[in-house]
Image (tube, grey):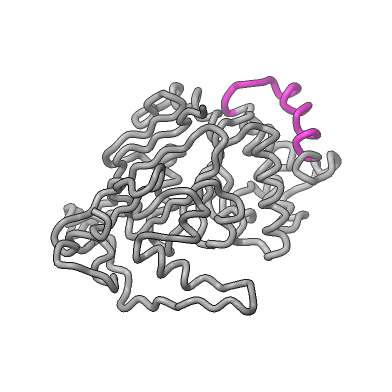
Amino acid sequence: MSVNLLEVQNVKKYFPITAGLMLKTVGNVKAVDEVTLTLKEGETLGIVGESGCGKSTLGRMIMRVLDTTEGKIIFNGQDITNLEGKKLRRIRSQFQMIFQDPYSSLNPKMSVEQIITEPFYVNGIASLKEAKKKVGPLLTRVGLKESDRTRFPHEFSGGQRQRIGIARALALNPKLIVADEAVSALDVSVQSQILNLMMELKEEFDLSYIFISHNLAVVKHISDRVGVMYLGNLVEIGDKDELYQNPFHPYTKALLSSAPEPKRNVKKEKIILQGEVPSPANPPTGCPFHTRCPKVMDVCKEIRPVLKEVNPHYSVACHLYQ
């Protein structure tokens, strides 16, 4: 039975809003608000939601690029929420990130060899000579040539640059990779190649993924479970097949109804949500979705629903099921 590699417990990330000459805090942007989830070893968890829902902020907190305002992040049984300096650097080699933009995530002044060996240097894991020996096999494994090690990022296409980013993420043999919109900047044909490569690498290197994307089809292709975020909150999480075929939360239903249907003869009901997404600087009381929900009840305006298991290993935060 697989064990939890990652546990995110009631994490919040608030960014202060300041005003006046003294920069007094007058409010907070609640980017992530009490999110709880787990990731098992060897699992891929997809995180979806509209732009601005907090999914990338959540990924950066898991990576410890951003500190949490509240809550805990437990990785491989160790609380990493407040680790700093050498203690954080020692464990950070076990979780790496693939960034959205393959153009800006690579240093244009560094060769491919320097980019891939840098993690070894930063973490003090291997000598430069030993690190250089690993560059060739990593490049060939991600679909590039060993001779590419002397070239620079501007000499590659977007898909090739993302392969370099993947090789860099694999260099330290991590247990977890957080992929933040890893294919959204690529052409559709290249997206499928990168996704298939990531799935192959997952099996070969015994990886676990947090895969963040706004593309529902991409998330379905690569994920084992899927979590849906809205306005900094996790509103539904569970097995991907169950979520896509029989979603519970009204927001998830609306989100899936808006996705293009690849089969010609299949017709599905479009759910058109009214109004705009509220500002995370001034979220509504009660359920964060109640201002746009077609099934809103009085209780939704007053009491915030919590994630509750409605099926085995499947949870929803909605008063319709509580």
Residue at image location 48% in from the left, 31% down from the top: 5
Question: Which quadrant holds residue 94?
Answer: top right
164 displayed left or right of 316: right
Q: Is 127 in the magenta?
A: yes
* Near-viewer residue (99 or 103): 99
104 displayed left or right of 18: right
Which contiguous range is marked in magenta?
122-139
Residue at image location 40% in from the left, 76% down from the top: 271
* Near-viewer residue (275 or 30): 275
Residue 210, percent from left and from top:
51, 44
Residue at image location 63% in from the left, 53% down from the top: 102
Residue at image location 57% in from the left, 35% down from the top: 42
Q: Is residue 22 above or below residue 175?
A: below
Q: Main secondary structure of the magenta part?
A: helix
Residue 287, percent from left and from top:
23, 60
222 displayed left or right of 47: right
Q: Is residue 226 above or below residue 3?
A: below
* Near-viewer residue (77 or 154): 77
Residue 89, percent from left and from top:
49, 26
* Near-viewer residue (109 or 46): 46
Q: Is 28 in the magenta?
A: no
